[in-house]
Amino acid sequence: MTEKLTRQPFILRNPSILVVLAVLAVFTVAVTLLSQAYGSGTVPTSTVKVLGKTLCLALAAVAMDLVWGYLGILSLGQMAFFALGGYLIGQWLMYARTEGIVAASLAQNPIPPTTAELQEGVANQIFGVVGSSDLPLVWSFAHSLPIQLLLVLAVPGLLALVFGWLAFRSRVNGVYLSILTQAMTLALALWLFQNDSGFRGNNGLSGLQNIPGLDAVDQATLSVWFLWASALALGLAYVLAAWLVSGKFGSVVRAIRDDETRVRFLGYPVEGFKLVVFTLAAMITAVAGALYYPQAGIINPAELMPIASIYLAVWVAIGGRGRLYGAIIGAVFVSLLSSWFTGGRAPGIHLPGYTVNWVDWWQVALGLGFVLVTLFAPKGIAGVVDRIGPLRAPSPERHAKEAKA
Amino acid sequence: MMNKLSAMLALTTAMALATGALAQDGEPIKIGVLHSLSGTMAISETTLKDTVLMMVERQNAKGGLLGRPLEAVVVDPASDWPLFAEKARELLTVSEVDAIFGCWTSVSRKSVLPVIEELNGLLFYPVQYEGEESSRNVIYTGAAPNQQAIPAVDYMAEELGVEKWALLGTDYVYPRTTNNILDAYLKDKGVAEGDIFVNYTPFGHSDWSKIVADVVALGADGKKVGVVSTINGDANVGFYKELAAAGVSADDIPVMAFSVGEEELAGLDTANLVGHLAAWNYFQTAESDANTAFIEEWKTFIGDEDRVTNDPMEATVIGFNAWVAAVEKAGTTDVDPVLDAIVGVTVPNLTGGTAMVLPNHHLTKPVLIGEIREDGQFDIVSQTEPVPGDAWTDFLPESAKLEADWPGKDCGMFNTQTNACVQVQSNY
Amino acid sequence: MIRSLLALALTLLLAMPASANPALQAVVAENLDQIEKPSRRTVEPLVAQIAATGPEGLALLSAWADRSLGVTDDGRLLIVDGDAATDAVTGQPVPGADPKMLRPNSGVRGIIESALVAGEISSPDPARRAAALASIARDGTAEHLAALRAAPAEADPALAAQRDRVTALLAIRFDPNPAARVAAIEAMSGDVGLDFRAALNPLLATTRVAAPTEPQANIARELTVGQADFPREAAIALLTSQGVLQPRLTPADQRNALAANIVDGSVGGVPVAELSDPAARDRAYEALEASGAVPPAATEAEAEAALAAHRFFEIYAEPDSDVTDAARAAQTGAQVRLAAMTGIDLGLDALSLASIYFLAAIGLAVTFGVMRVINMAHGEFIMMGAYTGYVVQTLVANRTLSLVLALPLAFAVTFGAGVLLYRLVIRHLAHRPLETLLATFGVSIALQQLAKNIFGTQARPLTAPAWLEGAITINDVISISSIRVAIFVLALLFLGLFLFIMKRTRLGLEVRAVTQNPGMAASMGINPDRIAMMTFGLGSGIAGIAGVAIGLFAQVTSELGQHYIVQSFMTVVVGGVGNIWGTLAGAALIGGLSKVIEALNPANTLAAQTFMILFIIIFIQFRPRGIIPQRGRAAEA
């Protein structure tokens, strides 16, 4: 990092980072001041939750942009890490909440409960709904928040590491790699769909919005806390990602995207670079998931079907890949727009003899719109920002011409 | 993902449908309709939304409720489970509805439960389900397992002489729990472990050749084989087609379905299904004046002579009427007095009897077994007296000792052995 | 069959002067309740009584079974035929009656049929004899055996064979003479028919008993405690269930006993607060036992003693050991053949699945092989094909004709859609495969939603013509539905057609040239753009035909394509690109593997799919270019 000493601090070289952080801070403060818990109450709790969740999606999009926009791997399995993060934090949320309930109930008995009875009670509460009463092995650490938090990072990270190592080692790339990542998330989803996997099958984990130990705090307050946490995570991850792609490391990464073989011939350990970025992105995505699902309240395997990951790629593409703020713009813009159109609030278009109902037609419009963006605006919305603003993102264009892959 | 986000902003989602109210005084009473209008569940749930709207219209024509008009607030949770929770919160806090009619799948109900209990809402849940739940804030107007699964199995054992059981289901909570209960029940009745074959398939499964062959092979030990199907939705099409192709008729291996009703059969060529069975609490062919009038009214409301009626619609109607009766009894729409008033309320059902709201928030319902006809309707071959719904099944050891008694013990999960309330909130 | 019986009964009725049947009248009057609400368990004597009253009784029975029997408010039974109704007892026509129709369930109908059937075995009409045989085969009794043996010789050879088989099967079950039963078993030994196994297995059913000495019964074998299928716990459970041994103390019982004996905040001298420790609970319980406050629980020593004092046996329900020996021998003989045939059946299933995957993937392989383009909308082309089939079927009533029309039409529709997609989108994204992937994904979601808007979300029926219904059955184990055979043939046809186009036509030559070196091909006067367009259309067209085929055995929904798209990708990737044989190998591998895993884990089809995908992920690690990799310079493109 000698670079830093001789040149300006990297934040100053990238004014876009300051802008993003400033916007994020203003947004968070504004929502807080309008929330029911800390302010005027103009913004209802359900909206605060939506905004908090959107920030988490933006965080996942930043990670996706690292992998796709900078490293050139179109990962169609990114939401697997997102959902894994959610499942792992969900385990603790469910276990701890249920343990409290069961302990309170067993305390009414004349005889104090044994540890085995307590655990049996918890297992029966959690898995009774899917017709089982044993605590599966994968729940061994569910009682401990620190361990589960560690697992939120470790499990997706390890999965990405192993998967990436296998795939990169055998030089699977391009479309093949995309299909393979898709297969990974599908396999994981199908596995989770089974009741026998120990994650309650199709029902998934629910009641996640009730945080154990914080029973006294109402949802209005909790939702703001989670908004802060999400904003903080997004800010930190953005700085981390921007720092990563701005230095020499970033140059090598982009070089790999543009011509992997040449970088390899130059003597760089290409697989190592890919693994680092892929794993890091997986961990960032997992953190996003761990923050998202306590706000959503329920997670089930449908969340990691391949289609979800493809949507993530779509957001990044529309926002403008290869620019970190593009990913944020894409995720926020498309997801909020989608919800506006499918929420039944968008006025229908009345044609003679037929009314275009947006609930039915939004998907069609989105699909076709996406084709148009790909065809005519490959840089996405951020391409527009590039033109109007002096903001110079850590743009790939400085280093390479049009991305080949 | 898009479904998840559909309708995510929660500001003024409510697509308030102004109902044709008469000139009534006072603020309208708002009720929420929380059924998916898009996504995979739309086909089933849209019908229930229309049913609620029809009931609202009918009630307003009668002069409304407590002298005030009713107004339905319709939202679309888009078959996306987290969105159900979000929309429920919105209905209760932004639109401030007094009751919600909604949900279809178990997972959507589990998603809504914490919100409803936190905000003290009132949900009417109109679909047959796996039981093992009784929330203070939910009235379960569909069948509990003892009102559908167990009588159906009894019928197969006694009337069809089935000795060997194939429990086929889609892999999710309703089939899992139902099959667990049936497994315990059948073993109680002396059926050997080896005479119960269980298989779970994914949603939308289409390659049934192997499973049908397995079921046929069950007949190898000379016992009469019967299939209890909790296969969900579209997957039934492929399953019945493969059965027919294998030359299996209802006389050889009868199939008793818990999720196939008039609406599902409307999309099928029923020639091959004749004689197979379904168990519900209502069939369109039920012979009663109330039913004839209801079918007539439904067809007029929806403007389509070919539309069918089905069991969840009846459950919705009963739930709506029970709520109206309870509100009139309580003299207010506030949730707590209505909950106190609703227990014990009796309303006529459409099969010629009455349904009573029990202290465990379930209903008394008759169990009907129907044989599929060529026209996609059912011949009712068996009808019981109304059976009280049992929130906690008697056939699983952990549940047998539990009972729910809302006004009495103020507990949905009361352990009768230790005489203590296990927990007031539900399991999610 | 019931209809024919009814017809017979009616003819008999007409032939006779209409007269009351007092016996029938009495039976009906007495049992009207039961006739209205019959139950399979109790209806049998009533049916026999009615049948004994003569032809009117039989006519009433067949009408009853046919659901054409109604009851009037004043308790008369009417046989209803369309608008006309006749009194079942008197035979008099009853004009303008509005009876409540009776709907006996299929169990009751089976009993009525079986009562009517005995007389039908010797009917002059072969169809009726066949129907009677089928009914007996389904639910035979000892009386049927007697009736079959007493019936005159069967003229029709096929029916005669069937009758001999049914008679032999009934003899195994019901013949009073054990020697005859053994003979019947031995004569059929080696047969793998389901009905034969169904006759044998009940003979070999066993129960387990524990006894101090060898019981007087037909013993299958003696069990040793601790052997693989009879662990110690099973022996103890058996002893407990026979009441020989007291049940062991369960934790719940222990807790309840302790709770019932709390004195001054302690149990048996152990403070209640300490009872969260299992060891403390044991101490407390022992103290209670010692003081006599609770009954002693079964101890390990008692269990040991009971085990030592007993021997364990499996006993046949069938008392005659000759019969069980013969049955066991016959069963063992059939086992190997049965296993082989199950294997063959599994193979057929796998072949069928492979051919479906092949059909679904072939179009994808073509476009991917030639243009390195992954078409995410490929699944939607399959869906379009299926909906085309549905639309044609709603317009053309004749199912054979509609199928014949649907296949080329589906090809045309999806060919057109493919060409359109190529012209509008894909050609503008040349050499940007990942962008193409995303753009076609956009097309995919648009098409899916469009299908939902047009056809609704409910499954639409696409029904095969009658000649494709049913199955090709070799025996009771090996059978495959005709529709799957047809799909297999279709897959073969397309394999042949594809090979023909690629190897024997100008287009194929040009396609191969463009695949290998587009630049060189262009300089030789080939228009790569046109070739790419044609290939894309061809691939899409085949997807459309696959859609019709899939719709015939599965369900037509807007998500139909989604169910097959990932498998199709896998097929292409596993097989290797740009080579039809690779696709074939990939489809065979995936189809076969799915079925094998499914067979290993019959209770959970989802697990099978998960393992299959995991296998593919690992497989790709070792053969990243697929089973049949592309060679030469094109591979580096």
Image: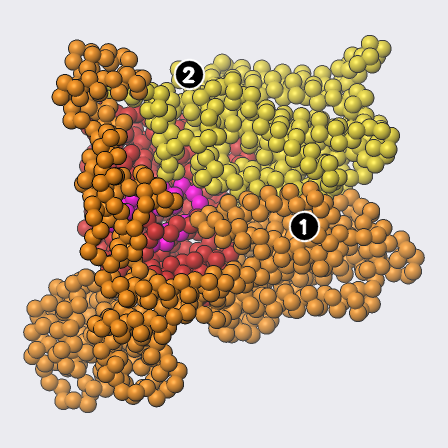
* Residue at figure coordinates x 79%, y 57% from the top left: C532
What's the magenta bit mostly, secondary-structure-wise?
helix
Q: Please state the chain letter of the residue tagged with numbered disc 1 in the rendered image.
A: C
- For chain C, the rendered hue is orange
- For chain A, the rendered hue is yellow
Task: Quickly name the residue at label 2.
Answer: A213
Badges 2 and 1, same chain: no
Circle 2: residue type: Gly
Give the answer, above or below, for where C243 lies relative to C491. Answer: above
Give the answer, above or below, for where B75 lies relative to C59. Answer: above
Q: In which quarter of the image is residue B105?
A: top left
Q: Which chain is red in the picture?
A: B
Residue closest to the far right: C523
Task: Quickly name the residue at label 1.
Answer: C574
Residue stretch rendered in magenta on the structure: B165-190
* Residue at figure coordinates x 23%, y 43% from the top left: C310
Q: In which quarter of the image is the N terminus of chain C?
A: bottom left
Q: In which quarter of the image is residue A256?
A: top right
Per the model, the C-alpha gap separating discs 2 and 1 is 50 Å
Q: Is residue C87 left or right of residue A47?
A: left
* Residue at figure coordinates x 63%, y 21% from the top left: A234
Residue B253 at least partly seen: no
Circle 1: residue type: Val
Q: Does the magenta stretch include residue C5?
A: no
Q: Position of residue A153 (x, y in %)?
A: 59, 24
